[in-house]
Amino acid sequence: MAYRCIPLTLSLLIKLIDRIFLMPFTNDVAKNELGRTLPGVFQDPIQPQASAVSWGAIIAGAAATAALALILLMLGTGLGLSSVSPWAYSGVSATTFGVSTILWLAFTQIVASGMGGYLAGRLRTKWVDAQLDEVYFRDTAHGFLSWAVAAIATAALLTSVIGSIVSSGIQAGATVAGDVTAAVWSENSKFDADNGPMGYFVDSLFRRNINAAVADDQPEHDAMHMIGVGPRRFSIGSGYEVTRIFMNTVHTGPLSNEDIQYVGQVVAHRTGLTQQAAEKRVFDTYARLQTKLQDVETATKEASDKTRKASAYAALWLFISLLIGAFVASFSATFGGRQRDL
């Protein structure tokens, strides 16, 4: 009976020796491999079961990132506005201003995200029993999370600004035709006044030779007086009618032969020109009007295309700068966490 208890006694004795001598040595070796128990460095009273995510450190790093980015953004805005000028041959060029803006955005993300990531790694909880690779991953995650929280908070505060930047590029490509039509009709809507492009071209149809005899106007004046219509009212009515004729076909093509003939008769009656000369004046004036409207359409398309390209480049470089900020924040967190564990 006694010889049966010998193996059991030896087994218990081996387990007791292992717990007393070997287990502390194993833990110390593991800790020293991670650089957490160096000579002269005291251990922090941290529980081994501490959470892998320190939200307090993440929020602190995100707040530092957002605040520093706001300060640098205000500084960059002031420097940018002071470098441009509406006067000719003064201030930086548009290309220089765009390149400097891109560089400043990248610099802002590097500094702000680096500071936030460093604080997130330096202030996080100390993990005692985590392996070296796991510590590196957690520090990287803390830096990335601090950058993400700062980006979300900044986007929430600047929703209107970011929305205008993104939507301007979309609207520029989707509403080019609408902008062109609005611009053309805006120009054409001025015909009812005495000034404006349409009114100018219509008035040019009825120009007369100032050296013509005043007596030539007397029969026309007498005829209009008999029907109760003044010369001014007759002239305005003719101008409105010609304007409506031009507006009916100015967007589709040339005037029809009937319209040219009729408008030529009105012009010949008002100016004393022959029918052939009046029709030639109508044809030339209508061609100049179409050229003017085509120039307006081309200018509107060019402006819309410039807006589209500027919005696309702004969104692209903003994405690149934010991506740089994410990498810098993650790397800075690993550096801060390494200093935290020493």
Image: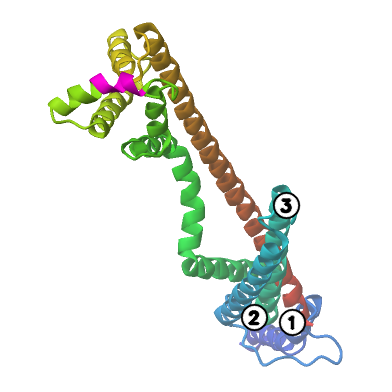
Magenta part, dominant SS: helix
* Front tag of 1 and 3: 3
What mark, if any, has residue 296 been given in the picture? none
Cα–Cα gap, marks 3 and 2: 37 Å
Q: Position of residue 122 (x, y in %)?
A: 70, 80
Cα–Cα gap, marks 2 and 1: 8 Å
Instruction: Check disc 2 and report the residue beneath it.
Output: 124
Q: Nearer the viewer, residue 105 or 17?
A: 105
Q: Residue at x 36, y 9 (%)?
A: 274
* Front tag of 3 and 2: 3
Instruction: Check disc 3 and report the residue beneath it.
Output: 99
Instruction: Name the amino acid, label 3.
Output: Val
Quadrant position of residue 255: top left
Instruction: Check disc 1 and report the residue beneath it.
Output: 340
Mark 1 is surrounded, within 10 Å at the Cα level, by few (under 14), some (14 to 19) or many (20 or more) other residues, namely some
Q: Nearer the viewer, residue 59 or 301?
A: 301
In the displayed structure, does residue 254 sit left or right of residue 149? left
Asked if the residue at tag 1 contacts the one at tag 2, i.e. Cβ–Cβ closer than 8 Å, the answer is yes
